[in-house]
Amino acid sequence: MALDKSPVLKRCRSLGLEPQFLGVNKTSKRQIRRMTKKKSEYGLQLNEKQKAKFIYGVLERQFRSYYDKAKKMEGITGANILILLERRIDNVVYRMGLATTRRQARQIVRHGHVTVNGKRLDIPSCLLDAGDVVAVAQASRSKEYFKGMDEKLAKAAVPAWLVVDAANMGAKIERFPLREEIDVPIEEHFIVELYSK
C-alpha cells in the first residue's frame, strides 16, 4: 500500500490550497514571496489533477482508473470523477465526522473499525452505493477514540447526501452527491482536458 507522506502544509503551499480543505487547522509560519510566472495550459491542468489526488489521498494509477470509469458513466466526466472520489469509504467516514482528516479516516477504515451493511470492511478505496449503511464496528465502540463519538456525530455538519444516525454511530448514503454539493476547490474540466490529450 503506497501513501503520499509529503508534508501537508508544504504541499498545500505548492498547490495553492488552503489546509482547511484537508481538515488541517494549521497555517504555515514561513511565507516565501516568490515571483509567480503565468502557468501554461498544461501547468494548470496538471496542478488541478495533483490537487484532486492530494485532497483525496489517491495515487496516479488509481486516479487514472477513476477517470476511465467516469468516462464510461453517463453525465459530465469531470463531475463523475469527483462523485467517484466522494463515494470512497474513507471519504464517507471523513464526511460523516468520524475523523478530522481523510488520512485519519483511511487509518480508521484500514484498522477494521468500520462496517458497511453490517460487514467489516478494511479497504479504504471501496466505492459505496446509495442505500449503504456505514457504522462503527460493535467491537470498536469500546475503544478510547470512539467514546463520546455519538455526541460529536450529532453536532457534525454533514453533506445532504448523507443521513447520520448518531445514536448508532453510523450514516446512510441516501443518494450520490451532486457536483454542487462537493466543496473541494477543483476545476475538474482541466483534469478531463489533461487525460483526453
Image (spheres, helix red, strand yellow):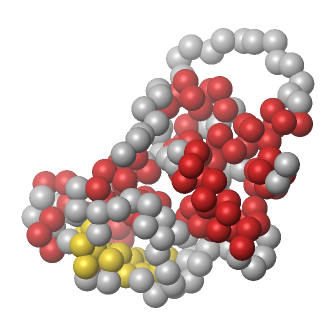
Residue 7 appears in view: yes
Residue at 29%, 63% in the rendered image: 122
Task: Indicate whether 150 appears above or below 147.
Answer: below
Residue at 29%, 69% in the rendered image: 121
As drawn, is 189 to the left or to the right of 19?
right
As drawn, is 145 to the left or to the right of 181?
left
**Which quadrant holds residue 72?**
bottom right
As drawn, is 105 to the left or to the right of 149?
right
Task: Indicate whether 135 appears above or below 196.
Answer: below
Residue 166 appears in view: no
Residue 102 picture location, percent across and down:
44, 51
Of all residues, the one furthest to the bottom in this rendering is 131
Taking depth in this image into account, of 41 and 91 the one nearest to the observer is: 41
Residue at 71%, 76% in the rendered image: 73
Residue 192 picture location, percent across and down:
79, 55
As drawn, is 9 to the left or to the right of 147?
right
Task: Indicate whether 11 appears above or below 108.
Answer: above
Residue at 75%, 12% in the rendered image: 34
Q: How many marks?
A: 0
Residue 172 picture location, percent across and down:
42, 81
Task: Indicate whether 108 appears above or below 29.
Answer: below
Residue 133 picture location, percent across and down:
37, 81
